[in-house]
Amino acid sequence: MAPVSTPTTSAAALEQTFGEIPSNVGDGYQIESVRISRIRNRDGDWSAMLKFSRCETFRKKETDMGIDKQPVLGIIQLDSAHAMEGASGDVIERSDLMPFSIGDPSLWHLPLQSVIAKRADIIANKVPTPEAVSGILEAVGRLDPHVQLIIGGCGYMLASRKYLYGRTSTATLTSGLEFLSLALRMTNRPVGIITWDVEPLVSLLEDHPGSERFRFLNVGDLPEWSKSWTCRSAYRKPGGWTKERMAQQFADRLAEAFAEDGIFEDVGVLVIECMIVPDFRETIRTVTSPPVLDLIHFAKAALE
C-alpha cells in the first residue's frame, strides 16, 4: 500500500476522513502528516496503520508546558540476521519483522530505540567472549544519552553484567535473570526458570547464591519454537510455523512440568529468561498460577 499524505489539518478533520484516531492525538493539535503503512500486528496479520507526527511548533509548546515526557526504551539486540536497528518507525517498515519479538514495536506502547551489539551473536553472548562484551558496551554507549531505560534483548546478556553496570547514567537491566535474587527472597520453595537453552544457563548460574533451588524448563527444542528462530520468514506459510502451535506445544510442556513429580511441581515463583516467552503469559495461566517475573513486563510498568 502506497503512503498517503494529507495537508496539515486538525485532529477532528482527520477523524472525519480516516475514522477513529488514537486517543493521544487530541483535537487542538495540528497533524503534520499522515501515512498509511502495511504492517503486521502482534498476531502477524497485515493491517493498515495511521502514522502521525505533530508539527514542531506544537511539540515545542508541549515540551514548554511539561507535557512531552514520554520515555523511550532502549533495547540491545543480539548480532544476528534477524536483528533490527533503529527507532520504532524505522523498524515498522521492515516486512520481515517477526511478530511478538522484543523488537516488534506493537509489543510495546511506548517509543523504542534498538541498537545491535556487534559481535555479540547467540553463541558469543553466552560465554561471553571479549568481543561480545565489547559489542554490548558499545551498544549501551550509543543508547545511554537518548533513552530512559535500557534492556537486553536476550536473557543470556546476564553473562556480561559485571562489565556493564556502573558505566551508564541510564537505568539498565540486561536480563530477566536479574530477578532471580528477588524470586529467591519471595519464597522458600524452588524457583522455576523458563529458558531457550538449559545447558549453558545451568553453567552460567552455578555460582549464584541459592542456585540449588533453581529448576529449569527448556523451550528452544520445541519444534515450532525452533522454527520461529531458524525460519522466521515461514511464519503462517505452508509448512511454516504459527504462534498458535507454539502456544500449544508450550502448554503441553508446562503441564508436564507442573504435574506430579514434574520438574516444576513445587515451584513458588517463575522467572523468564527467554524474551519470546513473556508474550505467552496467557498460556502459562492456563496451566499454573504462581507469580511470573520477566523483563518485558517490568520495562512496561517502569515506563508507564
Image (spheres, grey):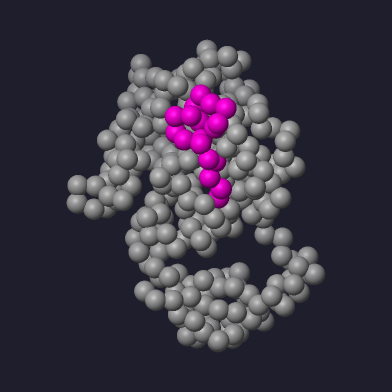
Q: Which of the pair 290/65 is nearer the observer?
A: 65
**Residue 227 figure quarter:** top left
Q: Is residue 297 above or below residue 105?
A: above
Q: Nearer the viewer, residue 158 or 20?
A: 158
Does residue 297 appear in this view?
no
Q: Please check the rendered image and state whether residue 124 is part of the magenta-colored stretch, yes or no.
A: yes
Rendered location of residue 207, percent (x, y): 57, 14
Provide residue 164's location: percent of width, then percent of height: 66, 32
Residue 253 visible in the current orientation: yes
Q: Quadrant of residue 226?
A: top left
Q: Residue at x 70, y 41 (%)?
A: 171
Q: Is residue 200 above or below residue 111?
A: above
> Quick one: quadrant of the N terminus?
bottom left
Q: Residue at x 33, y 47 (%)?
A: 232
Residue at 58% over, 70% down = 23
Q: Which residues fall within the magenta stretch?
A: 114-132
Magenta stretch holds residue 275: no
- The image position of residue 140, as x and y in percent, is 64, 42
